[in-house]
Amino acid sequence: MRLTFSALIAGLVASPAFAAGDVFFSLSNTDFIVLLAFILFVGVLMYFKVPMMIGSMLDNRAVGIKSELDEARALREEAQTLLASYERKQQEVKEQADRIVTSAKAEATEAADQARADLEKSITRRLTAAEEQIVSAQAAAVKEVRDQAIVVAIAAAKDVIAKKMTAAEGNALIDSAIAEVDAKLH
């Protein structure tokens, strides 16, 4: 306060009115009136303690700004922690996805190999079944040809025997066939 008042007095002493030689402390001098109004204004400000109120408001504002900065710093650290956590989780998910893909490829390869082996077994089984059917068909054809040959031979023998055989010879032949069948069955 003293420093500003001293600066004010020094300003008055070195004013152009003193240099010109006019009377400065006159109510007709506008510079003097402005000076008085300014001193009165500064006095009123000091009386109502406006500089202290402005200082306390600035101090409160500084404290508020400092608390906001501290809160922002804390939020930034929390955000960095969350970011690091999400980056770790993202890396873990990526690794897990890679493992799943690798496992799926291995399972697909294994399934393809198994399907190939099953297909080969199925083809082998079908070939074997087809060969067995062919052999069975051949045996059936041979049996049918033999049966047909037997039927033809029996018919031919019947005709030949019927022409050459008498009733007594037929009865003897029947009796011997019955005895032979009876011997084979028992």
Image: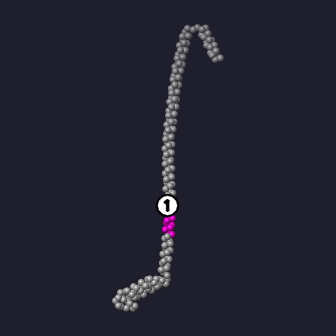
Find the residue positioned furthest to the right: 186
Q: Is residue 96 positioned above or below 138 on the image?
A: below
Q: Residues within 10 Å of mark 1 (few under 14, many from 20)?
A: few
Q: Is residue 73 positioned above or below 90 on the image?
A: below
Q: Residue at x 49, y 65 (%)?
A: 73
Q: Residue at x 51, y 33 (%)?
A: 121
The image position of residue 75, as x and y in percent, is 50, 64
State which quarter of the image contains the C terminus.
top right
Q: Residue at x 64, y 17 (%)?
A: 185
Q: Chief secondary structure of the magenta span?
A: helix
The image position of residue 115, as x and y in percent, is 50, 38
Chain part drawn in magenta: 67-78
Describe the colour scheme in one phrase: one colour
The amino acid type, in three-letter code, at marker 1 is: Gln
Residue 78 or 161: which is nearer the viewer?
A: 78
The residue singled out by tag 1 in the image is: 80
Q: Is residue 61 left or right of residue 21?
A: right
The image position of residue 113, as x and y in percent, is 50, 38
Looking at the rendering, which quadrant does residue 169 occupy? Answer: top right
The image position of residue 70, as x and y in percent, is 50, 67
- Confirm whether residue 178 shows in the render: no
Find the residue positioned furthest to the left: 20
- Confirm whether residue 21 shows in the render: yes
Magenta highlight on residue 76: yes
Q: Is residue 139 positioned above or below 81 on the image?
A: above
Q: Is residue 173 left or right of residue 42?
A: right
Secondary structure of the residue carrying numbered label 1: helix
